[in-house]
């Protein structure tokens, strides 16, 4: 009964038959291709950003209307503002409070496309501690 050759057996036999220079060149081309791909990707995404317009911390008096200052999103050199999803708190200016609005670009490869804006209404309790933590964190 003939023994079936596994893929590993066939691959091992092919590698043994390969000239050492062929194997070295194949590995070299693989490394050059990977480095080239990484370079091209980094150049294409060099200008990618999600930036908040206006201030990162907005201060309002109780009863004062909140107007969204906006944002700018760029991905692969194109406007991606339509991909920004706002979540977090709903700003209620009728009462004191600390509200956080999260801006996130969904569906893109990079995971650092998120920003947070704080809206401070009045002088709520714990404001100093919040600001120390919020302003000390990354954007």
Image (cartoon, rainbow, N blue to C red):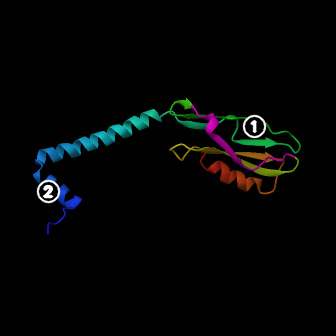
Which residues fall within the magenta stretch? 79-93
Could you give the CA–CA distance between mark 1 and mark 2, rounded to whole angstroms? Answer: 66 Å
CB under 8 Å between discs 1 and 2: no
Q: Is residue 89 magenta?
A: yes
Q: Name the residue rendered at 12%, 49% in the picture.
A: 18
Name the residue furthest top.
78
Above or below for 121 versus 2 = above
Indicate the quadrant where residue 83 lies: top right
Split into 4 quadrants, where in the image is the C terminus?
Answer: top right
- What element does badge 1 sit on? loop
Q: Nearer the viewer, residue 136 or 104?
A: 104
Q: Residue at x 59, y 38 (%)?
A: 50
Residue neighbourhood size for the residue with mark 2, other residues' Cα within 10 Å, grouped as few (<14), some (14–19), many (≥20): few
Q: Earlier in the sequence, mark 1 or mark 2?
A: 2
Where residue 26 appears, as percent x and y from the top left, is 21, 44
What is the number of the mark on residue 68? 1
Q: Image height check: is 13 above or below 42?
A: below
Residue ID for mark 2: 13
Instruction: Name above or below for residue 29 compared with residue 3.
Output: above
Q: Position of residue 84 (x, y in %)?
A: 64, 40
Q: Mark 1 or mark 2, which is nearer to you?
A: 2
Is 6 in front, or is 127? 6
Q: Is residue 73 magenta?
A: no
Sort mark 1 into few (<14), some (14-19) or many (20+) by Cα contacts within 10 Å: few
Q: Residue at x 45, y 33 (%)?
A: 44
Q: Which mark is residue 128?
A: none
Vertical position of residue 26 compared to residue 2: above or below? above
Q: Report the side of 70 relative to 14 (left or right).
A: right
Q: Secondary structure at mark 2?
A: helix
Side of 100 where 109 appears, left or right: left
Determine which quarter of the picture holds residue 37: top left
Q: Position of residue 11 (x, y in %)?
A: 19, 55
């Amino acid at each position: 009964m003939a023994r079936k050759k596994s893929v590993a057996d066939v691959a091992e036999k092919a590698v043994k038959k390969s000239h050492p220079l062929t194997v070295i060149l194949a590995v070299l081309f693989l490394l050059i291709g990977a480095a080239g791909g990484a370079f091209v990707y980094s150049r294409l995404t060099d200008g990618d950003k999600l930036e908040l317009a206006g201030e990162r911390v907005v201060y309002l008096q109780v009863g004062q209307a909140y107007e969204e200052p906006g944002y700018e999103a760029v991905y692969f050199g194109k406007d991606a503002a339509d991909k920004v999803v706002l979540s977090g708190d709903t700003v209620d200016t009728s009462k004191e409070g600390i509200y956080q609005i999260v801006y996130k670009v969904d569906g893109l490869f990079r995971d650092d496309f998120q920003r947070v804006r704080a809206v401070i209404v009045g002088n709520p309790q714990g404001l100093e501690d919040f600001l120390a933590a919020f302003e000390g964190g990354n954007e």
